[in-house]
Image (cartoon, rainbow, N blue to C red):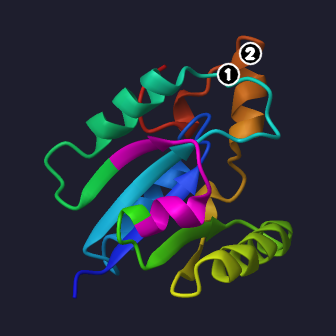
């Protein structure tokens, strides 16, 4: 049976830390679907969603087993629609674990066949967060070090 993982997030922007999780996930799964979702707690995206799709797709050109989708539904429903048996999530710290654990339990309630797999962030990416990158970029700072593409 093909092992498919959904890697969901708002990816505003998609960072080197996210890229690292996908590349490491390819050692565990046959296919990874990067799901760019609309986060209802964030009013507006900073980076255009079509730009993110383009940038992320370009990272995986020539690498089989990675695809990008945009969604506006429950993550558990998207996983079911794509026959994903796993959710792939990265954890930087205990705060991430507390947040992700709660979401994982709800996703399991909504789709009892959906398992969440947590990968601990590689040390060199642990301080990177999309929120911080947006703020640095908004005020003219250089974010190239933290992103696997140019913006």
Mark 1 vs 2: CB contact within 8 A: yes
Q: Position of residue 37 (x, y in %)?
A: 58, 44
Q: Can you tell which quarter of the image residue 61 is in? A: top left
Q: Can you tell which quarter of the image residue 103 is in? A: bottom right
- In the picture of the structure, the residue carrying the numbered disc 2 is 138
Q: Residue at x 13, y 47 (%)?
A: 62
- In the picture of the structure, the residue carrying the numbered disc 1 is 46
Q: Position of residue 143 (x, y in %)?
A: 61, 27
Q: Which residues are magenta?
A: 68-80
Quarter of the picture containing the N terminus is bottom left
User: As displayed, is residue 129 above or below residue 64?
Assistant: above
Question: Is any part of residue 121 visible from this angle?
Answer: no
Q: Residue at x 31, y 77 (%)?
A: 27
Local SS, label 2: helix
Farthest-out residue, top? 140
User: As displayed, is residue 19 above or below residue 94?
Assistant: above
The answer for how far apart the CA atoms under marks 1 and 2 are is 9 Å
Question: Is any part of residue 74 visible from this angle?
Answer: yes
Question: In the image shown, does 2 or 80 lie closer to the viewer?
Answer: 80
């Amino acid at each position: 049976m093909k092992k498919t993982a959904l890697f969901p997030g708002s990816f505003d922007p998609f960072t080197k830390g996210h890229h690292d999780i996908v590349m490491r996930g390819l050692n565990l799964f046959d296919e990874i679907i990067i799901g760019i979702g609309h986060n209802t707690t964030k009013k507006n995206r900073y980076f255009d969603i079509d730009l993110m799709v383009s940038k992320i797709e370009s990272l995986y050109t020539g690498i089989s087993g990675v695809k990008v989708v945009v969604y506006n539904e429950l993550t558990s429903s998207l996983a079911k629609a794509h026959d994903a048996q796993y959710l792939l999530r990265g954890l930087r710290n205990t705060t991430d674990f507390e947040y992700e654990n709660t979401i994982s339990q709800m996703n399991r309630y909504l789709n009892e066949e959906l398992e969440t797999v947590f990968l601990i962030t590689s040390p060199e990416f642990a301080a990177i967060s999309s929120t911080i990158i947006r703020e640095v970029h908004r005020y003219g700072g250089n974010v190239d070090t933290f992103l696997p593409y140019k913006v």
